[in-house]
Image (cartoon, rainbow, N blue to C red):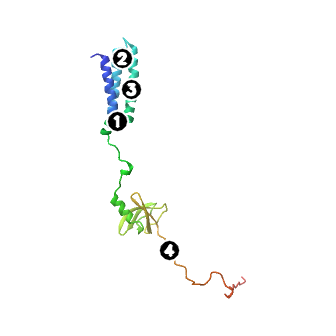
Amino acid sequence: MDYGQIAICLLLVGLAVIFAEIFIPSGGLLALFSASCLLAAVYCAYTAWWETSPNSFWGFVVAAVVATPVVAGCALYVFPYTPVGKAALLEPPKADELQGDTAHERHLKSLVGETGRTVNMLTPGGIVLVDGERVHCESEGMLIEPNTEVEIVGIRGARLVVRERVEKPAEAEDFGDRPAVAQEDDPPIDFEISPG
């Protein structure tokens, strides 16, 4: 086997290792091995063709320089879509196929509308105590003091969304059929103004 054949073999091995480097995590060892193969291929090509056919040597160098990014690009962008690539590589699940912890999510949804008490300062995330259970929560963007009664208004991811509970004002006094506008027979309002 002469140096020209060795140069071609080393070039093919270097390109194959570049292809493998894309899919096998090696911490750069495969890339180092590939670079060594390509440099050895150029050296063998120089030894084989520089004296007799410099154009063949430069053609080999150009082929190596062009083939290296082409092989890496094919490994990244073409191979995953081929039948062999689809069989070799795992396809990630589609977004609609992803399911969270549905039991946990159902439990959180069942707490919406309940009331609880904050364990720590919500800034806006923190812990709320609901029926003796500590649950991660976040406020709607407001700071809420510890030991404050809160209402659970929704869920966001794996957290409850809470807001400070505000007591409803007492119902206004029922004045019956009394009109809101003063009538003629109502006594006038008398204000005493004392000199002061």
Quadrant hosting residue 195: bottom right
User: Where residue 51 sits in the image (x, y, percent)?
Assistant: 37, 11
> Which label sits in the foreground, 3 or 1?
1
The mark nearer the N terminus, 2 or 3, is 2
User: Where residue 190 sits in the image (x, y, percent)?
Assistant: 69, 86
Helix, strand or loop status at disc 3: helix
Helix, strand or loop status at disc 4: loop
Q: Which residue is mark 1?
A: 82
Q: Which residue is mark 2?
A: 46
- The span from disc 4 to disc 3 (Cα, nearest Å) is 75 Å
> Which label sits in the foreground, 4 or 2?
4
Question: Would you call the spot at circle 3 few (<14 residues within 10 Å), some (14-19), or many (20 or more)?
Answer: some
Q: Amino acid at mark 4?
A: Lys
Return the residue nearer the eye: 87 or 55.
87
Q: Which residue is mark 3?
A: 67
The mark nearer the N terminus, 3 or 1, is 3
Which residue is painted at 38% across and 34% down in the image?
78
User: Where residue 171 sits in the image (x, y, percent)?
Assistant: 52, 78
Q: Which mark is residue 168?
A: 4
The mark nearer the N terminus, 4 or 2, is 2
- The span from disc 3 to disc 1 (Cα, nearest Å) is 20 Å
- The span from disc 2 to disc 1 (Cα, nearest Å) is 37 Å
Helix, strand or loop status at disc 2: helix
